[in-house]
Image (spheres, rainbow, N blue to C red):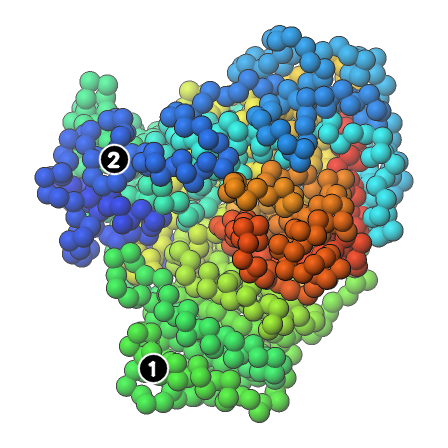
Amino acid sequence: MSQQGYVATPPYSQSQPGMGLSSHHYGHYGDPSQATSPGMVKPAAPLGATSPGVLPPPGTLPPGPHQFGQNGAHASGQPPQRFPGSPPANSVAPSYASYQPSTQPSYPPPVATSSVTHLGTQLNAMQINNYGSGMTSPSQGSPGPLSATSFQGPPRPPQPSILQPGSQVLPPPPTALNGPGAPPLPPTLHRQEGLPGPAPLNAQYQPPPPPGQTLGAGYPQQAANYGPQMAGAQLSYPGGFPTGPSQMAGPPQLQKKLDPDSIPSPIQVIENDRATKGGQVYTTNTRGQVPPLVTTDCVIQDQGNASPRYIRCTTYCFPCTSDMAKQAQIPLAAVIKPFATIPSNETPLYLVNHGENGPVRCNRCKAYMCPFMQFIEGGRKYQCGLCNCVNDVPPFYFQHLDHIGRRLDHYEKPELSLGSYEYVATLDYCRKNRPPNPPAFIFMIDVSYSNIKNGLVKLICEELKTVLEKLPKEEQEETSAIRVGFITYNKVLHFFNVKSNLAQPQMMVVTDVGEVFVPLLDGFLVNYQESQSVIHNLLDQIPEMFADSSENETVFAPVIQAGMEALKAAECPGKLFIFHSSLPTAEAPGKLKNRDDKKLVNTDKEKLLFQPQTNVYESLAKACVSHGCSVTLFLFPSQYVDVASLSLVPQLTGGTLYKYNNFQIHLDSQQFLKDLRNDIEKKIGFDAIMRVRTSTGFRATDFFGAIFMNNTTDVEMAAIDCDKAVTVEFKHDDKLSEDTGALIQCAVLYTTIGGQRRLRIHNLGLNCSSQLADLYKSCETDALINFFAKSAFKAVLHQPLKVIREILVNQTAHMLACYRKNCASPLAVSQLILPESMKVFPVYMNCLLKNCVLLSRPEISTDERAYQRQLVMAMAVADSQLFFYPQLLPIHTLDVKNTALPAPVRCSESRLSEEGIFLLANGLHMFLWLGVSSPPELIQAIFNVPSFAHVNTDMTLLPEVGNPYSQQLRMTMNLLQQKRPYSMKLIIVKQREQPEMVFRQFLVEDKGLYGGASYVDFLCCVHKEICQLLN
Ligand SMILES: [Zn+2]
């Protein structure tokens, strides 16, 4: 990889005063036709003629500082001092009406909520009901904006129990429940089922060496998030991970005693945030501001910090010192989704083009020009906000300052006033200092016997004819610049020449899979439009060609090798789409054997199941990354295929893994085809390097995602698409200042689908404080869970799972104990007090602990665990939130006159009812659960059959019955599916029938099917740990 771009000195040229952002660039961005393009916009004039359609009328060109936003659709109605403009108000209200009819123009002040959640010590005592007095289950209506005071105990007159910013947390009201005399929490019922043996608590959790030796070289060997364990914390996780399925049916006795409404509800937290912030405009002008939750729809306006769609943090206020950070043990991390899709009512990224000058960068730390730079000396110099170096302003970039020391062109230049923007990269940022070629897609189809037999090959070939029409292209281009190529394989490889002037496609067979070479260059990668008839001819012929093949064996590594070599020969980046079904047992590099050994489960060797069985795939991944070759794998396994080995290359090359177990054409085609279409069409950047720079005092130390690291700082991605997120952990290396805060700049150098080299910059300023309370106040639980999931799932490669689970529980207790000790009242030691921002952290953490990756159970397929592990590693916050805490909707309450989704309910069996119909979605699966007494009229409306008994559960698509209820339900399902990276397969489940067991696994507040504590049990466990830590 060329990392040169990151170290090259900017080629400042002398005096080109006319350079910089010439006005016509703005017209380009302001054009409403660009509104749906999240930044993958065409370069402005210097790189090619701007098409007339995107030029603003000449008269509107704005040299004045306050006219920047006057071009295009986003300017209307804007306060003059902000150029990107809020989206037109009328584009906001209707789409968000479902959550919040309010049309309040500005972001509302925070609702007065308590910053703490008090829970009585006697969690298993009935009196705790008092705490639920203010709560109404969402399923029972009352959609009003309930504040967190729901947990505040009996109603009482307004009193200063509300935590004001900076104030101390007030003691809870002295009720019998939480008074100082309350006895400590008794052990829970299931404690004896806890993890056996003494917890190796003080064994420092060694940071996992990254997969393989080559990766390991530069990794900081520090205790990462699993940092020093708290002395004295004796941990025993109750609720038993390993408990038998027999436990599933009856809720534990403890739950009977405790009103679930009295413990913090994720639904309530989500609904409260929606009620106060949904449908509003959120502006990013305040450093350290905690954004709305990922589950809240709002319109985000960039005013100097990156949108939370691009970056979310575990906390928006960093502790000033590393001692404080160690004390709290709250991970300091950012989840960065650099190519996040931006809704059409938000402004797409602006593109800055400095021509041959390239981006302006700090001489010392190489940070890119951004709102953190302070101009001084009349505009001749600027001080870098990250490293404090004073730099000369290059002559072409000079501008005078106004009376408050701000450049006169402040609002004209995105890089001075926005959190996110793009730069056109100069040749210094390109491989071999040459402009890149446009990327290519290579389709590689496993044509072994079973795939031909079950019709999969035919299905793929048919679909490709359609989907190739939709190859991604630059906004203003007629056709896609992406070239395509085709390979089929079983134990040998078949390359196809599809050159446009051929009457028939030509096949070239490569039998030497030990050392794959590309038998043809000319005619392999072609323009789809030009070669359309030859390609269609080929796709028609492929299923016939191999119809009589009885070949069962396949190769896999040589397939990737072939695709990579083809891209390398064509000197372009690209993506391989591999459609594969079996364990590659044919004699070839990367050959695999069935090594699925359930006896390893729950032993120290369990980690082997998650590691690839040969190092071939890692070296292959490395080669792929160095040639900009990303691999996306569609897997159709009918038995063990060793996902841990097969998925390594997709994982390390920024690709995606899709898995369809026991694929059946008539049931699963829709799900697969939707995934394929979505994957081909999605926004994507190629041959990318990401660099995260920070202001002094802290730095990025660890990275998690579908990424490759050759050194400690450059995150390499053969490709990165709109759904992939990289989670970055930060550590102190000095004191942070409350004045300057903690600044983060993420820069991604990449090649666009049109073959242009770009830099995408995201800046985010966080606060710093020497008060622990500020740190806790600014936490984001959803981001915390994303971080913990990725760090734990990375650790499973190297650590016994038991240790990882214990560390997670321990750190949970530690974080909350530190809050309890330092931020809450010294009274009522035995009371469980949760910070407002982490109120639902325990329930989410318990969901993570119960995920099949961390749950050591032989009943769960090894491949499924490896698959989910890999999925989560690349997930963004919204996806991990839904994945760990599914959405459960009471469908029987659908209102056909209202397009709003029904209010969700908590994921617990106790929320279901025999008379109800519920829809559950977690981003991978969607279940429609039918209660035994479902109203026949609803059954009729949905399925067009007279009764529950008549419903055929063997369907993955609902029939189009043609009544409002059916339409509404299908629309609801589409809404849930929207914006999700994976197509969810619909599974219909009848109450009390066998498949219900699968569904119940997703009722994550209950005790797990294969073990895993209920929410109540887990809360009791954490509370006990906290009490021990405090004593
Ligand atoms: Zn600097």
- Label 1: which secondary element: helix
- Label 2: which secondary element: helix
Q: Is residue 531 left or right of residue 849?
A: left
Which residue is located at x 25 percent, y 34 percent? 76
Q: CA distance from mark 2 to mark 1?
A: 46 Å
Question: Is residue 448 placed above or below 833 in the rendered structure?
Answer: below
Residue placed under numbered mark 1 in the picture: 533
Dot 1 surroundings within 10 Å: few (below 14), some, or many (20 or more)? some
Q: Mark 2: which amino acid? A: Ala
Which residue is located at x 59 percent, y 14 percent? 162
Q: Mark 1: which amino acid? A: Ser
Q: Is residue 883 left or right of residue 511?
A: right
The mark that comes first in sequence, 2 or 1, is 2
Question: Is residue 803 placed above or below 632 in the rendered structure?
Answer: above
Q: Residue 720: where, in percent of width, then height?
A: 44, 55
Q: Is residue 348 visible?
A: yes
Q: Is residue 222 visible?
A: no
Q: Which mark is residue 75?
A: 2
| Residue 871, quarter of the rendered image | bottom right
